[in-house]
Amino acid sequence: MGLSTVGSIAVVGCLGTSQRFSIGVGSANTRSYQAAHALAVAADRHSDELSVRVESVGPPSHRLYSVDDGTVDAVGVDNTILYRASENRGVFDLDPIDVLPHQGFAYGHREYYWLAVEAEQSTPDSTAEFADRVVHPGQPGDPSRLVAEQLLRDADLWQAIDIDNHPYTEVPAAVEQRTISCLLATQHNRQTLAEWSQAVDDRVGDRLAVVPTGSSFQTAIDDAPNTVGRSIEPVGWDNGALDEAVDGWAVPMQWLHSPSADPDAVAELTRIAHDHGRTLREVDPLAVEGSPDRLTESVINGLAVHEGTAKVFSERESWNSDWTVGNAVD
């Protein structure tokens, strides 16, 4: 599935003798676009070697096809999309990626936790009590929905749940009308609540309660290569009286590079993210703090890491010996 057209959204960076490096992202309101724009600005300010071009190439699956067919050098997606491509799931079952891109470094993560709407029914003690309740696990087709469905299936809970498929714009009203019993809350990088979750808080925040994950769902989180189990501090709930820390999980978002991308260019991009996090956050307040632990938390074991990224983190003594270098193994 090649892409016949790619819309160029922005060109930022020095134009002298520096190498051009193209990054495929979503539309201007997406996390990948915002993060790539910040990288482009940081490259312009801090690198004589690299100029970053940001291009819109549509939804996440399209981005993987665009790096596979050589349209761009790198793309930004979350780890659920990479995992599905590596397993030939969903759209990748009918049209597999010929050569998976190599992993780079994190530019953010989404955090998730379950909430129940207090009504006549008691609040579930865990996801194991979702049976026969109306649950909204994210908008169909959205990366949040993909990971929620994946985990619910792995926990053997999916078949017993009455799944609600409202688009995000209709969820606040559905929750207010009590046609949804439980829902998946989404926030970004420990800093901001997703816009649609904020709208739920505005209308019915005082009627929401946290649902613990429960043992079977927690096992699914721990076993999934694309998720990171963690205790999450809910943010942005002005009306909801939620606990200070709740059971949940995160899905890292990262830059993925063409296996043929110049290792020196990828190394320079990685160095910029590591050394100039302050610049990134000036442009993109949700940018990941530039410590090695945060930047490498996105790596999925068993999938190749680009040698340019490996070079930088090896030099900074933050390399995991279990990670696989894509183009060159020492």
Image (cartoon, helix red, strand yellow):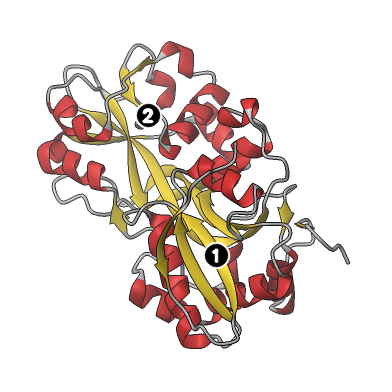
**In this picture, is 127 found above or below 10?**
above
Question: In the picture provided, is 201 more to the left or to the right than 102?
Answer: left
**In this picture, is 18 found above or below 159?**
below
Q: Regarding mark 1 in the picture, which secondary structure is present there?
A: strand
Where residue 261 sits, quadrant-wise, is bottom right
Question: In the picture provided, is 191 more to the left or to the right than 215?
Answer: left
Q: Which residue is mark 1?
A: 22
Q: Which residue is mark 2?
A: 137
Q: Amino acid at mark 2?
A: Pro
2 and 1 marks in contact (CB < 8 Å): no
In the picture, the quarter occupied by the N terminus is top right
**In this picture, is 316 found above or below 97?**
below
Q: Regarding mark 2 in the picture, which secondary structure is present there?
A: loop
Whether residue 40 is visible: yes
Q: Residue at x 74, y 62 (%)?
A: 320
Query: Where residue 229 sits: x, y (%)?
Result: 52, 45
Q: Amino acid at mark 1?
A: Ser
**Which of the two residues, 271 or 153, is positioned nearer the viewer here?**
271
Crowd tier of the residue under label 2, counting other residues whose Cα lies within 10 Å: few below 14, some 14–19, many 20 or above:
many
Q: Residue at x 34, y 77 (%)?
A: 282
Query: Where residue 126 sits: x, y (%)?
Result: 40, 27
**In this picture, is 94 found above or below 142?**
above
Crowd tier of the residue under label 1, counting other residues whose Cα lies within 10 Å: few below 14, some 14–19, many 20 or above:
many
Q: Residue at x 63, y 42 (%)?
A: 225
